[in-house]
Amino acid sequence: MTPSPPTAPGLQGLIELAKQDLAQRLSIATDQIKLVEATEVEWSDSSLGCPQPEIAYLQVVTPGYLILLDAGNKEYEYHASRDTYVIYCENPSPPIPGTSEDR
């Protein structure tokens, strides 16, 4: 199944940022990375579901996106805000239940 192209404004740019980051991490070309899913979600705080130790985060519901990429038959999870911030998430926390379209 081919994922449908993202329709939210700015989401395609966030996906490209995630692909560029993953390509750099894996030392591969971005065309070797496939989009698995890009879903609009709400994160429980400003960490976007990727809290780092010893960093304080605003405890506010933060709208954003869950972006799943595939490279070499392995999935990589990226979390994004609604604007320009994208982060690779090694130990992700899930979005607020019921806020994603198909998860």
Image: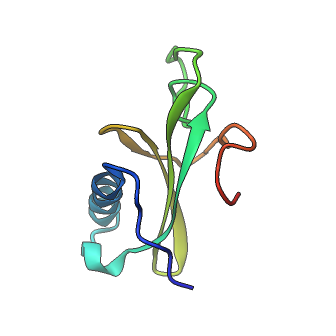
Residue at left 49%, top 18%? Answer: 55
Nearest the eye: 21 or 66: 66
Point out the residue furthest to the right here: 97
Position of the N terminus by quadrant:
bottom right
* Residue at image point 37% right, 75% down: 33
Number of numbered discs: 0
Instruction: Give left or right: position of 80 versus 91.
Output: left
Decide if residue 72 is on the left or right side of residue 42: left
On the image, the x and y values in percent for residue 17 come to 28, 54
Residue under the point 51% across and 34% down: 63
- Compare residues 97 and 55 and report the one nearer the observer: 97
**In the image as oriented, which residue stretches furthest toward the bottom?**
1
Q: Nearer the viewer, residue 23 or 84?
A: 84
Q: Is residue 97 above or below residue 8?
A: above
Tell me: residue 23, above or below residue 84: below
Q: Indicate the quadrant where residue 39 lies.
A: bottom right
Which is more toward the observer, 42 or 35? Answer: 42
Q: Position of residue 9 (x, y in %)?
A: 33, 49
Residue 67 falls left or right of residue 92:
left
- 52 on left or right of 22: right
| Image position, residue 38 (x, y; %) | 49, 59
Question: Which quarter of the picture shows residue 45?
Answer: top right
Within the image, what quadrant is residue 99 found in?
top right
Q: Quadrant of the C terminus?
A: bottom right
Residue 92 vertical placement versus 51 (above, below): below
Q: How is the image coloured?
A: rainbow
